[in-house]
Image (spheres, grey):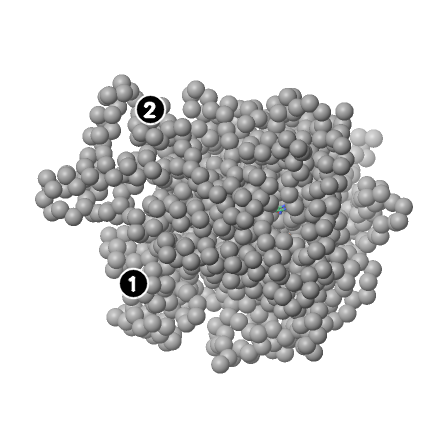
């Protein structure tokens, strides 16, 4: 029998972590990636990676609180056992990355330094300068190179994953790849295929993501029958620098250090911003949120900036949406000292010094919480059964999903610095599971009848050839991509309305049909980037449809999915008794809403459209509770809510922290 | 109406881009001109994107779009290195308005010259990754089980190591280096992929390793655990194509987009290899 092999598609943090761990377990690995793995998108992450640590522990932090912050931040839309396991492992993952040589910033005594990130009270975030993602990725890349030099890992860089190969029983037995240089299409028999192919920001045209983040690989698995979860949950970051090619992140710390967000009161005022008098400036965050001002939470800042430009027409520029983020009132030297690194990014790409000229920023699509549906095996304690072959597996046997392309860890909204963690964690735990899987498998994929693979190669080759042979003069793939980006950005980002989503769905359907009619400007068979892009574009549509349809159907607000028509109301009564009554009703409505909507959106592809069903979420560890930020009457709702919780706990005989007892009916699976 | 660039200079409505193209390895290269409409906040990547969307030369001839390499567009992935207006650099941070300030007529793009051209502006830099293997640029940990934290490190140590760890394998330093010369092999008809790879590796291993890999060897030799295999890295640096090839021209450090102190690394490696050689001589 041939030796069993694993094919890992994608060499970001997730794929590399899996490769390294599999190699350690003695399993041979092939790795396929569009870019050399060292150039994967993970290098873009700046901020850091979260883990409870010795210091925070003494301030009352624990792995459990990290779990709580993560599921609360995600508005309870994620299954809790995988998150619990991840937060339990987080401190060990930091230790491991430290041993691998990551140049984490140090305290004077030589410990790993930490900073505080959004969504928590604790300084959990370890960081390496302003390039944490790059440093983490490099240390994994180095370990994988070490295994490569020993022949345990074989890399196929500049290769495009075209799809899984399924046998007659629907089991995955390998995949098809295409060499981006020679354009050769070939089969890779594999006893397990792991997708660690990252996010899908390019569906929105421009985003903060890298150019290979098209979601094409996930889409190809989806079209082959893999389920796609919570597609509509897309995170938009409030402050990015608009660019002609990409939207680049501008860190929240600019506002933290006193940056003020404003627009001229006169629409598209063409004067030099510094000459516009105070009275003619609209500091809309400060006016609308006097208490928090420019430091309102991310989702609120995002919505308000969006509203000012899109609905109020007050964008700074004609034909392009942006607002001022102004630091010019702060002493230039102080700015250099505190914000030097991030201001340099602005200057590098805009050619303007933000210490003297207000920056122009706008929200940008940043992260996809949704992704390929992945499974897990739960222990009685509520964690994961390690080494279970079920962990991270898709619904297609032998096909796994890890990293940003799975839907598992971040629910409806991701906390900052939690993604690098989930990527490494999911990569590490998938490995022992595959080891177990291999013990139970009979035969190796490499020994299967070759016709299974040659048939698939032929099919993909025929599709490729047909694309090249398209008559000229039809649709232009780059222009269709632009149109897709526009409709997605308009309808399925910050504020969602059913009429817009309805129209957007029709537009996406229509664009998909047009895209099938693209003709290529390059019909050669050598490093043809035109055909590779066109294929990726075609594969954006199934995911775009899943995102829009999921958003259209989810009639509520949850995390990043904000639909004002279904927002929970503020309390209106002025007197306490009235407010209590309203708060009771509010809590009833909250429970009702959870019964209906605290469910994962599951899309399956029917060949033309996604069919949507819903699955219960395992909330057995931490009871879902309302997020009350900014609501009038929040204290009263909280009071009522806590009383109800206490009663429920007493009734179910639970003593402790509320763990293990699903108190919201219908929420547990 | 013409756009106004940030510093008040009038930017043109459009500008010309002159690109050195090549259909594939071993083929002749040729210059081609494109005219691109000026937009706000353009960089060389967005210029290439516009050309891809509408691949027509200045004479209105439809051509195949230009092939190039990029990913992050933030100068952290190292993919997009090319020679822009005669200077090796990242295309993503090459801002059009700045380039037009130097030469308002045109922007000139060429592939790197020290690596085999795959097509147009795409080159094959696998030799760089091979060099990282050669110097064993990794921390030789026992394994990936939980063994507690790594060795404690001082802030000073981190501040020395961090800049070196930012190397993104872009290859600018190698393009600028007079000692680094192109190695380009062609697969023989009767040669298998594996055999060809072996022959390429052998050729890479005997050619100059370059500043980036030398600096990585220094990085790992300074790591508390990496130190344990310092001798092996020094052996690699003293091997054929090792540090002795460096003529100390210092071109490398001037072009590194990450401002990595390459000449400091080279000096450190030079001293360490000398000591290592003497020790080895006495241990004979
Ligand atoms: C600007 C920015 C800043 C961020 N900062 C932080 C932060 O501070 N903290 C944090 O926790 N998270 C952060 N994130 C999120 C985090 O960086 C990503 O979620 C994470 O890096 C994703 O890693 P990954 O391994 O899943 O995929 P990626 O790193 O995206 O890698 C995907 C891999 O798949 C390959 N691939 C894709 N498609 C195909 C295909 N069709 N065929 C073959 N190969 C394919 C690619 O080549 C690549 O190797 C940030 C994100 C952005 C955009
Ligand atoms: S110092 Fe050495 S490595 Fe750097 S450019 Fe000169 S010869 Fe090349
Ligand atoms: S040392 Fe600098 S120039 Fe050389 S490869 Fe690294 S980042 Fe690029
Ligand atoms: S695209 Fe990554 S460095 Fe330019």
Q: Residue furthest top?
A: A653
Of the numbered discs in the image, which one, if any, rests on residue A283? 1
Q: CA distance from mark 2 to mark 1?
A: 46 Å
Residue visible at 48% across and 59% down? A507
Residue A452 vs residue B31, the one in the foreground: A452
Quarter of the image with the C terminus of chain A is top left
Q: Position of residue A662 (x, y in %)?
A: 33, 26
From the viewer's perspective, tell me whether residue A70 is left or right of residue A17: left
Which of labels 2 and 1 is toward the front? 2
From the viewer's perspective, tell me whether residue A222 is left or right of residue A653: right
Marks 2/1 same chain:
yes
Q: Position of residue A107 (x, y in %)?
A: 46, 39
Badge 2 crowding class, 10 Å Cα cut-off, few under 14, some 14 to 19, many 20 or more, is some
Q: Quadrant of residue A100?
A: top right
Residue A349 vs residue A129, the one in the foreground: A349
The secondary structure type at the circle numbered 1 is loop
Residue visible at 31% across and 25% down? A658
The chain to which mark 1 is attached is: A
Residue B257 in view (yes/no)? no
In this figure, which residue is indicated by the disc labeled 2? A661
Is there a contact, CB below 8 Å, between mark 2 and mark 1? no
Of the numbered discs in the image, which one, if any, rests on residue B40? none
Residue visible at 34% across and 50% down? A563
Please, is residue A360 above or below residue A15 in the view?
below
Please, is residue A384 above or below residue A614 in the view?
above
Q: Position of residue B213 (x, y in %)?
A: 70, 47
């Amino acid at each position: 029998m041939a030796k069993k092999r694993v094919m890992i598609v994608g060499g970001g943090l997730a794929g590399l972590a899996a490769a390294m761990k599999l190699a350690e377990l003695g399993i041979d690995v092939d790795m396929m990636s569009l870019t050399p793995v060292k150039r994967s998108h993970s290098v873009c992450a700046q901020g850091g990676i979260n883990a409870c640590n010795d210091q925070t522990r003494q301030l009352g932090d624990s792995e459990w609180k990290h779990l709580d912050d993560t599921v609360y931040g995600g508005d309870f839309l994620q299954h809790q056992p995988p998150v619990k396991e991840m937060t339990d492992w987080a401190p060990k993952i930091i230790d491991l990355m430290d041993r691998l040589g990551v140049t984490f910033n140090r305290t004077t005594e030589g410990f790993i330094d930490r900073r505080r990130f959004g969504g928590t009270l604790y300084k959990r975030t370890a960081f390496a300068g302003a390039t944490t993602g790059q440093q983490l990725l490099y240390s994994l890349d180095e370990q994988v190179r070490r295994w490569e030099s020993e022949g345990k890992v074989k890399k196929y860089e500049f290769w495009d994953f075209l799809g899984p190969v399924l046998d007659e029983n629907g089991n995955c037995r390998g995949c098809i790849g295409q060499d981006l240089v020679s354009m050769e299409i070939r089969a890779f028999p594999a006893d397990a295929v792991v997708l660690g192919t990252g996010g899908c920001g390019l569906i929105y045209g421009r985003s903060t993501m890298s150019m290979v983040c098209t979601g094409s690989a996930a889409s190809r698995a989806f079209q082959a029958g893999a389920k796609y979860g919570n597609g509509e949950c897309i995170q938009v970051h409030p402050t990015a620098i608009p660019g002609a090619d990409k939207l680049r992140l501008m860190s929240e710390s600019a506002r933290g250090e006193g940056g003020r967000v404003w627009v001229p009161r006169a629409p598209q005022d063409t004067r030099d911003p510094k000459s516009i008098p105070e009275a003619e400036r609209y500091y809309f965050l400060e006016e609308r949120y006097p208490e928090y001002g420019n430091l309102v939470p991310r989702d609120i800042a995002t919505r308000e900036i969006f509203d000012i430009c899109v609905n109020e027409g007050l964008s700074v520029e004609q034909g392009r949406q942006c607002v001022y983020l102004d630091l010019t009132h702060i002493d230039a030297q102080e700015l250099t000292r505190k914000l030097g690194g991030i201001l340099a990014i602005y200057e590098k790409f805009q050619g303007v010094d933000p210490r003297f000229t207000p920056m122009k920023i706008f929200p940008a699509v940043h992260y996809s919480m949704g992704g390929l549906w992945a499974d897990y095996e739960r222990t009685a304690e509520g964690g994961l059964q390690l080494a279970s072959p079920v962990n991270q597996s898709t619904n297609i046997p032998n096909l796994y999903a890890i990293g940003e392309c799975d839907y598992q860890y971040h629910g409806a909204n991701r906390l900052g610095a939690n993604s690098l963690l989930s990527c490494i964690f999911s990569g590490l735990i998938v490995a022992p599971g595959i080891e177990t899987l291999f013990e139970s498998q009979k035969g190796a994929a490499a020994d299967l009848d070759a016709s299974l693979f040659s048939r698939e190669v032929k099919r993909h080759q025929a599709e490729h050839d047909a694309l090249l042979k398209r008559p000229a003069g039809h649709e232009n793939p780059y222009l269709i991509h632009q149109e897709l980006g526009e409709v997605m950005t308009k309808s399925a980002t910050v504020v969602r309305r059913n009429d817009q989503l309805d129209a957007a769905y029709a537009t996406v359907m229509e664009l998909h049909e047009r895209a099938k009619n693209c003709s290529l400007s390059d019909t050669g068979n050598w490093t043809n980037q035109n055909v590779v892009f066109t294929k990726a574009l075609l594969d954006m549509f199934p995911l775009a449809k899943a995102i829009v349809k999921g958003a259209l159907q989810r009639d509520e607000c949850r995390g990043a999915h904000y639909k004002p028509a279904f927002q929970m109301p503020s309390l209106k009564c002025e007197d306490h008794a009235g407010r209590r009554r309203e708060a009771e009703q509010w809590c009833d409505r909250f429970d009702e809403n959870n019964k209906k909507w605290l469910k994962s959106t599951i899309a399956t592809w029917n060949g033309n459209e996604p069919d949507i069903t819903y699955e219960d979420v395992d909330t057995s560890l931490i009871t879902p509770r309302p997020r009350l930020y900014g609501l009038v009457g929040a204290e009263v709702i909280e009071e009522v809510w806590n009383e109800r919780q206490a009663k429920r706990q007493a009734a179910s005989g639970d003593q402790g922290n509320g763990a293990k007892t699903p108190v919201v009916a219908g929420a547990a699976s | 109406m013409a756009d106004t660039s940030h510093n008040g200079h009038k930017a043109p409505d459009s500008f010309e881009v002159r690109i050195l193209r090549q259909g594939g390895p071993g083929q002749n290269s040729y210059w081609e001109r494109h005219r691109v409409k000026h937009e706000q906040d353009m960089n060389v990547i967005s210029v290439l994107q516009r050309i891809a969307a509408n691949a027509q030369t200045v004479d209105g001839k439809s051509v195949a779009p230009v092939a190039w390499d990029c990913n992050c567009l933030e100068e952290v992935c190292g993919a997009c290195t090319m020679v822009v207006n005669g200077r090796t650099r990242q295309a993503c941070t090459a801002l059009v308005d700045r380039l037009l300030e130097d030469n308002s007529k045109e922007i000139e793009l060429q592939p790197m010259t020290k690596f085999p051209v795959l097509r147009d502006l795409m080159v094959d830099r696998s030799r760089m990754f091979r060099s990282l293997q050669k110097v064993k640029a990794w921390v030789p940990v026992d394994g990936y089980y939980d063994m507690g934290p790594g060795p404690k490190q001082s802030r000073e140590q981190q501040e020395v190591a961090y800049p070196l760890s930012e190397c993104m394998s872009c290859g600018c330093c190698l393009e600028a280096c007079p000692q680094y010369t192109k190695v380009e092999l062609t697969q023989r008809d009767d040669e298998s992929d594996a055999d060809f790879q072996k022959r390429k590796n052998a050729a890479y291993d005997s050619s100059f390793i370059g500043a980036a890999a030398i600096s990585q060897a220094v990085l790992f030799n300074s790591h508390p655990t990496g130190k344990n295999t310092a001798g092996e890295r020094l052996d690699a640096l003293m091997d054929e194509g090792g540090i002795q090839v460096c003529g100390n021209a210092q071109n490398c450090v001037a072009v590194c987009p990450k401002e990595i102190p390459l000449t400091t690394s080279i000096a450190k490696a030079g001293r360490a290899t000398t000591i290592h050689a003497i020790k080895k001589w006495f241990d004979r």
